Every structure is written in structure tokens, then in C-alpha cells.
Amino acid sequence: MKIDYSIEAPAIEGRLSLSQIEELIAKPLDSKPDKKFLLALSISGSALALGALCVLLTFYYGIGLWGNNQPVGWGFDIVNFVFWVGIGHAGTLISAILFLLRQKWRTGIARFAEAMTIFAVMTAGLFPALHTGRPWLDGYLLPYPNQHNLWVNFTSPLLWDVFAVSTYFTVSLVFWYVGLIPDFASLRDRTTSKIKKVIYSIFSLGWRHSHRNWQHYEKAYMLLAGFATPLVLSVHTIVSFDFAVSIMPGWHATIFPPYFVAGAIFSGFAMVVTVLIFVRKIFDLEHIITVNHLEKMNKVILATGMMVGYAYAMEFFIAWYSGNPIEQFVFINRAFGPYYWAYWIMVSCNVIFPQLFWIRKFRRNIPLMFVISIFVNIGMWFERFVITVTSLHRDFLPSSWGYYTPTLYDIGILIGSFGLFFTLVILFTKALPVVSISEIKAVADGAQPSHHGEGGH
Amino acid sequence: MEKKLFGVAAIFTTPDDIINAASSTVKKGYTKYDVYTPYPVHGMDNAMKLKPSKLGYLTLGFGLTGTFIALFFMWWMMAMDYPMIIGGKPFFALPAFIPVTFEVTVLLATLATVIGMLTFFFYFPNNSHPVHDTSFMKKVSSDKYGVCIECADPKFELEGVKEFLTSVGGIEIEEIYYAVKTEQRIFDPKFITFLIGVAIATSGGIYFALNKLMYMEPFTWMQTQQKLSAQAETKFFTDKFSMRPKIAGTVARGFIPYEYKGLALPPVEIVNPSVPDEKNLALGKKKYLTFCSPCHGNHGDGDSRLRGQFPNPPSLHSLKVREWNDGNLYHIIVNGQNVMPSYESQINVAERWAIVNYIRVLQKAKNASPEEIEIARKEGK
């Protein structure tokens, strides 16, 4: 196939009419769940149940069930936290940054990516909470007047994290909901079921597609996008501060914030591609979530993958250039020490395989991009593992060196986190429109007045 | 139910038509009208001659408020209320406060934008607007565009408006009615029951959460721990006491042994060596309230919190006790008396005398003569 990149591909393929678009997007909400859906739900549900069991056992016996101990105090819990927060970043990038950059193609995937952000941040949030050991006492994390007269430590990156992640979650949720309001109104006006109508009416807040409202609405949407953009950068920057602000060799690096943000977008896009490949097939949304969309995402994966690769190389360079023997040891130990396998899994998955996306045929090949996106997910999980564990396991004092092995409970909770995430994603596909109805209508052919030149979002 | 006309609506089929219709409506001089489109149509702001949205001011205002609140509270908490040196940073460590300041700014600005927009700009939630549930709404919600000119417009005139809408290309002209609200009675039994239900549910829920839930494992805020607590029984020591008695043959600082232990009263008068100054009496009060008041009451009246659970202790204002010398009171603290236990191991010598002095103060206060009260008044205390 020859593609002319000099003209912008239409956001929607196949010239659907507005009502056809609405029909297509609302179809999964009106039909009964089929076998495929229930099968997927039962798989993710079982994973979730396994995770829940491991968490309950952890509550009962304490976090001694996990593998982390001196000298590796941060194990799977923190690795998973960083991994899941990172997954969330793609959604905000697509919904906010691409919105500000006026990228029309984002409309097809923005809603879904935002939903994934919310679910990923929810999943991520579990880990620091569990990591505290007594999650029911996590109220202590907030500054509130108490009889101990104590305040939280505002100079600690861990506390910045509490604020960053909770703000990120709230803002993403609000942003997502604002996008859903007009869709709820459209669903309200097309449904025939009484109960659904009541539910949609409540959530639509009585939206009536009035242009006097649209005017403020568009303004608000832009303001929110404007806030979400620096916010998403701040969140992973702050997550990287959890490491970089300490004086641990292997963590104490100024490259961490940009490196973490690039990695987050990288892994997030890979996860979005993984999930969308299924969603567009299962729900017949191939016209709305087109191969062009996937190709564009693959380009982002390629670009951010290179940035991550650059960061890996730069870490080594700076370790050598610093002339600090301990710093140098940490990096040599990373690549050739006891955890060499994790390091090379990371490098090959994140830097080597995505290079295939230089070739257009591969960028548009669905089975191949599925495999690569899975590799990227694996690679990015291992990146966090490498950063967290290999830096800790051999620090300054050789007498306190150790080797971290996760226990079955660690692995169970990791599986459970995937279960939670995918259960939420699967339920979402049946409960809410996976593509923004009003936004996609606005970019359909002939949806904007003809004398109003470029138009576009 | 009485129905009233809200306005006249017309449907348009293409975005060009609706832009056209909107600008003609403005030109014709109508002001109370609205355009309905399933998605924002570009160029409509111009066609309707709308002023730019003022929403941004709200965002700015609240965003700056967030910045200020965050910085102010961090300064107050970290530098004023509980200053503590952390990592060698100054108390007001501005660079370290930036992340939280940023997050709070963003949080407040977004929430204010959205909540402000929905409530102050849209007056939402509003599911009872007249255009809801009309076939007009169903169409503009899906793939058509519409204009509705409202009765409230000073130029409104039913036939004229209909004619105008048809002339600009409108199809499916529809009159939109709304039901006149019958007055809502506050004393509606249903409403009252609802209120009572809400009241019971919230107060019950709060009562349960604060008085029961917070005392259940695991919400007890680490109260139950695997350590010995002072009054509890323990399996660790054979005598089952968590509090350990002093080791035989040792003398603790401030606890010089007392020679008349075991006698009912000391055979000789022991002289009070302490001076009842302000400091001494403050110590005596503190120790009295800690050790004696549970039984003898805060003012020595024998009206203790233990009433009924322990033999009633006598009043310390009896003539007998008032006439006793200080040594006798001291003796009873060290020795105890019948069921009253000895406080020899808890209260040191200086504190015992301070308690005695304080009891004297209590006695004086309760039993002063009118002349003495007059003198005290004159002295200004």
C-alpha cells in the first residue's frame, strides 16, 4: 500500500453519517454481553481474585510475606507502582497534549486512553498504600490538624508523590467526566430503556447541546488540557524524585525526570496499542480507530523508545565521566552483576525491538505491533525493576549486600494488578461509549461549515 | 397540569444552514434564543455574536488561590507551628515546596473551572428544562441542528417567529411547552419521612464510625500492640505483673526509706521540711490530682469517680484530719491506712510533702471563716 504522508488522513474512514457513528459507538452499550466478553471478564476477574487473595493474606500476616527486606527495601510494590503510573501517562498525553497540538486523529482514541489513565492510576495507587504496611492508617499521609501536633514532611518526595498522584487522579477523572457529559446527553436521548434513561439523565446533568453552553465548554476543555499537560509531566517527574532526591548511587541522577517521563509515555502508548488492537476488532470500530491511528502511536513508541535508549547510554556515560568509583561500580554491576538478565531483557525489549518500527510495513502490521507492544510493556516493567532493585542490592557497604527474590505473594499481587486494570477496562467497554461521540462527530466529513476553512479540533 | 409556551424551535440539516440561521436570528433582533448542535460547530460564536467566555478568570482566580493556600500553609506548618530541621534545609524551603504548590494550584484551578462552569455558567444539574424530552431535543442530540426562539424574547410573536424560522430554511417547526410548576409543599409527608430517614442514616452512620468502628481492629490506630502495657496482665513474668516492683535491697533516688512503716500513726511528730511556695503547691496539686483524686475527689470531699466501686474514702475535711499534724498525713501517704494502699513506691519524699501542703490549701479553702474570706478578697485574690 502506498501512503501519501503529505496529506492528513481522514480521522474517520469510510464516510459514515453522524447517526451511523453514534449507532456504531453506542452499540456495545445496547447489546447483551456475548461469550467473548464474558470469557475475557472471567480471565481478568480470576487474576483480580488471585491478587485480592494475596492482598488479604498480606493484610492478615503483614508485609513480611513479601520478598523485600534489607538491603532491598523497595521491591515489587514500588516497581509496580511506577509501572502503572507510567501506563497512565499515555492517556493524558493523547487527550491533553495532542489536543493542544490540534491533532485531529486523537479523537478516535482519546476517550479510551483517558479511561486507561484512570484505571492505571487507580491500580498504581494501591501499591504505595499496601507498601505502608497498614493501609487503613494511610490517613496519616495527609496534613490534618491532629492531637500529636504533627504535620507531614513537605520536603519529602514521598509526600510530593501523595499530592501528585492524587491530583493526577482527580484531574484525569474530572477531565474524563467533562468529556462524557455531552455523550451522556446523546445516550439519554436515544435510549428506550427507562432505567438507562434515568441513569444517563443524572450523569448528563441536563446537558442540552446548547451552543451557549458549548462555548464555555470548549473553553473549559482547553483550560483543562492546558493544566493536564504540565500535570502529567510533573507526576512522573515527582515519581522520579522518589529515587533521584536520595543519595543512592544509581538513583541520584539529574537525568531521571525527563528519562522517567519519556519512559512513561513509551510504556503507556504500548499499553494503549495492546488494548486498542482488541477493542477495535471486538467492537467493529475499525473505521473510527484506524490503522493510521495505530501507526501514529507506533511512531510515538519509536521516538520515546529512542529517548529511553539515550537515557540508558547517558547513565553509563555519566557514571564513567563522573570519575566516582561507586557510581561506576553500580552501572557495571547492573549490566554484568547478578541481575544482568533483568538488564538485558530491559535493553532488548525497550531499545532493540522497537527499532523495527522504522519500517512502514511493520508499523502498519497488526500482529507484529501487538508483539512489540507486549515486549515494550515487559521491557518497561523490567526497567523499573532494574532501577529499583539493582541499585539497592549492592550499595556502599559490601557486608550488607544481598539478592532480592520476590515471593509467590509478590507475583500474585502483580498478576492481580493486571486483573484489576483489565477488569475495569473490560467493564468500561460495556458501560460507557469507548469513543467520544460528540468529538468524533465534530471531525466527521462535512460536520463543519464549508466556509469555515480549516476548522478542526 | 397547566402548560405554557416556552418557545418555538426549528430543525436545520446542515452546519452551513445553522450558521446562517443563527446570524439571521441575531440580525432580526432576537436576543432570547439558543442554538442547539450535537457538537460544537465552528464559527458559531461569531454567528451568534457571543462575547468571549469569562470562564478563564475563574480558573485564574482559583489557581492563584491554590498557590497562595499551599505556600501559606506549608510555611505555617513547617516554619511556624512545628519547625524542624530536615536534611539541613531551611524551615521555609521554597524549592522543596514547589511540587506541592504546583499540584494544589492545578487541583484547585481544575475543580473550580469545572464546578464553576457547571453551576454558575450552566445552572446544572437541570433535567427539567423545557426542551428536554421533546422530539426537537432527540434530533439535535443526534445529527440535526436547531434554533429555539423563546417566549421571553421581547420581539416574540408566535406566527411571526414561525414565519421567520421557515424563511431561513428551518424544517419541522415545533412549539415547546413546559408544565407550570405546582407549588411544592415543604410539609409533604413523603418529604418529611425522607428528611427523617436521611437524618437517621447520617447520624447513625457517623455515630457508628466514630464510636464503634474506630475502636475495632484494625482501625484502632495501632492501640493494640505486642508490648507490655502498665496495668495489663502478662505471661512473661511469673507474678503476671507488667509493672515491675523495685528490686529488693535497693533504694531509688528520692525514695529514702521510712522508719515508721506499719504503725497506725507515727509515734513522734515528723516535721514538714518543705516551704509551701507557689512551685511547691503546683507540684502538690499535680500529684494530688494524679494519685489521690481518683478516690478522694478533686477537692478532697471523698466524692470520687470510684464511688460505689471501692469502699468510700473519707473526706479530708473532717475535723480529725484538719487537726492532724503534717507528719500524720505524710505517714498515711507512705503507709496507707486499712484499704487505702501505700504510695511509698510511686511518690517520692519531696512530692509527698507537696501533697500534704496542697491538702492544707484545700482544707483552708473549704473551711475558712467569713473574716478570712474577707481578708482574702481585700488582698485581691
Image: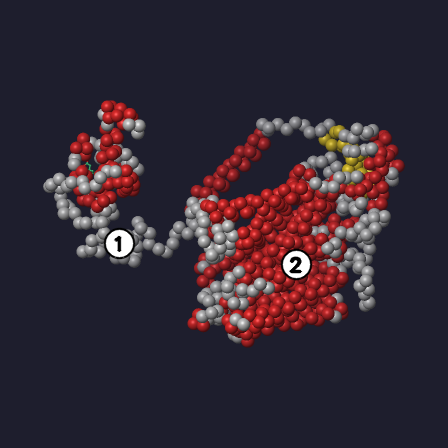
Residue nearest the viewer, comparing A254 with A330: A254
Q: Which mark is residue A90?
A: 2
Residue for point 85% across, 37% down: B24
Residue for point 85% across, 43% down: B17
Tag 1 and tag 2, C-beta contact below 8 Å: no
Q: Which x, y percent locates residue B264?
A: 14, 41
**Quadrant housing residue B212:** top left
Q: Quick one: SS at disc 1? A: loop
The crowding category of the residue bearing disc 1, from other C-alpha atoms within 10 Å (few below 14, some 14 to 19, many at least 20), is few
The amino acid at mark 1 is: Arg
Q: Which x, y percent locates residue A333?
A: 53, 73
Image check: A99 left or right of A83? right
Instruction: Determine if residue A344 is in view.
Output: yes
Q: Quick one: SS at disc 2? A: helix
Residue sitting at the far left: B267
Query: Which residue is tagged 1?
Result: B244
